[in-house]
Amino acid sequence: MSRQALFIHGTWLTPLIWSRFRRRFEACGYSCSAPAWPSLDTDLARQRSQPPRAVTRLGVAALLAHYEEHLRTFAHPPLLIGHDLGGLLVQLLLDRGMGSAGIAIAPPAQGGLEGLRDSGPWLLRRTLCQGVLHMSPQHFVRNMAQTLTPERQAAAYARHIVPAPARVFFDNALGIGSRIDFSNANRPPLLLIAAGADRTVRASTVAAAYRRHRGSTAVTTFKHFRGYSHWLIAEPGWETIADYCIEWAQDQLGRF
C-alpha cells in the first residue's frame, strides 16, 4: 500500500510553507498533497493587495468541508499533518474518522477565547470590525518568527504571509464548527507538537489539548520542542521536527 500524506496550512499562510516538509516526506516514499484553502489566490501579490471576497466568508466549517471533500479522492486514508489552525483541522478530521493518523503542530485551543488572547489584543480589536486581517511585519517578527535572523524574517514574511479571514478566529472561539469529542475511542492516532518559544500558540495551550485528548483510549502523543518559535516547520532546525513526525508515523502505521 502506498504511503500518502495530506498537509494542511494555517492562518496567514499558503501551502508554500510545507515545501521543505514535503520534500522530506517524499524522500521517505510518501505521495504528498497540500491543497490551499478555498479561494486562496496563488498570486501572492494579488492576495495581499485585494483578497477575494470569498475569503471573508471562510469559517472553520467551510474549511473542514473543503478538506473532507479532498480526502474522499484518496484511495486509502492518508496521514494528516497540520500547522496552526491546520492542526486544529487535523483533530476535527480525525474525530470524524478521516485519515489514518494525524499530526497537529502548534494547534490553537479548541473553543474559548484563549486562541484570541494568544494572538494579541490587536487581533481581537480588528476582528470585531473587519472581514480580512492583515499581519504587519512587526507582529510577524515579534510573535511568529522571533528566532530567525532579521534577513530571514524579511524573506519569510515576503514569501509566505497573506491576509487571513477573521471569521475563522471567532468560529473557533465560539465553537462554531470546531467541536471535538475528546473521549472518542475510535479516533486514529494523534501526535500533538508544541514549540517552547512559540508566542502565537503557547506550549501550555498544546499541553492542555493533550490532557483533554487523554480522556480517550485512542493513541495520543505529546512532544515539546524547546527553543522553537511558531515558525518551527520552516525555521532552521525544521528537519528535527520533520524527522520526528516521520518516525512517529512509522511507529503508528508500520508502513516502512
Image: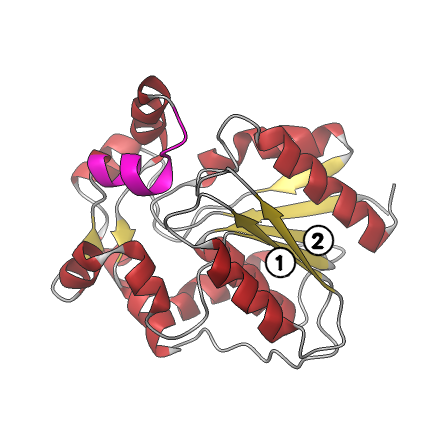
Residue at 24% from the left image edge and 41% from the top image edge = 139
The quarter of the displayed image where residue 75 is located: bottom right
Residue range in magenta is 138-148
Residue at 22% from the left image edge and 46% from the top image edge = 51
Q: Name, please, the residue furthest toward the top.
A: 151
Query: Does the magenta portion include 144?
Result: yes
Check residue 78 in the rendering and tell me which mark sits there, or answer none.
2
Residue at 15% from the left image edge and 58% from the top image edge = 126
Image quadrant containing the C terminus: top right
**Color encoding of the figure:** secondary structure
The answer for how far apart the CA atoms under marks 2 and 1 are is 8 Å
The spot of residue 60 in percent (x, y) is 40, 67
- From the image, tell me which residue sits under label 1: 71
Residue 67 horizontal side relative to residue 77, left or right: left
Task: Please tell me which residue lies in front, 225 or 216.
Answer: 225
Check residue 173 in the rendering and tell me which mark sits there, or answer none.
none
**Quick check: marks 2 and 1 in contact, CB under 8 Å?**
yes
Of helix, strand and loop, which one carries label 2?
loop
Residue 178 horizontal side relative to residue 200, left or right: right
Q: Residues within 10 Å of mark 2 (few under 14, many from 20)?
A: many
The spot of residue 110 in percent (x, y) is 46, 70
**Which one is closest to the eye, mark 2 or mark 1?**
2
Query: Does the image show residue 251?
Result: yes
Tell me the kind of residue under disc 1. Answer: Leu
N-term-proximal mark, 2 vs 1: 1
